[in-house]
Image (cartoon, rainbow, N blue to C red):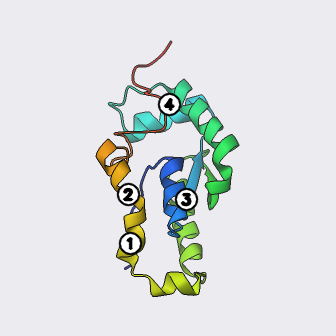
Amino acid sequence: QNKHALLDITPSAVERLNYVQYYPVVVFCEPESRQGIKAMRQWLAPDSRKSSRRLYAQANKMKKYCSHLFTATISLSGSGNAWYEQIQDIIRTQQNQPVWTTAEQADVAPEDSLELLNPPSTVASGYLTCDSHANSDYDDTDGEAG
């Protein structure tokens, strides 16, 4: 109660959740610039070797092609934990709204609808995973490019 997991997941994972009528709160954290990404990465993950240029390009691509999946967008500009407070406000707002569902969905046990996420053909291939980094939709961004 009053706790929520913050996950870094791919757009295709959000689409699969939507398909089985589980609608996650998806907050897109929009970077202000490549330098902003680099500064935040140094603050949150100083050992990270990911290219800020590639991360910024991926963020722009997601904003362009996946914005229909976003519940809200917040800016990472500014200093401090303003972005974290914005995420908390978005979650509070979403949690206070009614959740609409079809009568058929109300009669189905939650475990039964989750089985749609793991049909036998995809489980065998190893495509679906709890680790978004194992089979990410994004390019590998290891190594700082000049």
Q: How far apart are marks 2 and 4 (CA)?
A: 39 Å
Tag nearer the camera, 1 or 4 = 1
Comparing 103 with 47, the one in front is 103
In the drawing, does residue 144 fall left or right of residue 99? left
Q: Of helix, strand and loop, which one carries label 4?
A: helix
Q: How far apart are marks 1 and 2 (CA)?
A: 30 Å
Q: How far apart are marks 3 and 1 (CA)?
A: 16 Å
Residue position for label 3: 26
Height in image: 79 above or below 94?
above
Residue position for label 2: 119
Residue position for label 1: 3
Q: Of helix, strand and loop, which one carries label 2?
A: loop
Q: Which residue corresponds to the image point at 36% horizontal and 50% vertical from the top-left?
A: 121
Of mark 2 and mark 4, the one earlier in the sequence is 4
Q: Distance between the residues labelled 3 and 2?
A: 24 Å
Q: What residue type is labelled 4?
A: Lys
Tag nearer the camera, 4 or 3 = 3
Tag nearer the camera, 2 or 4 = 2
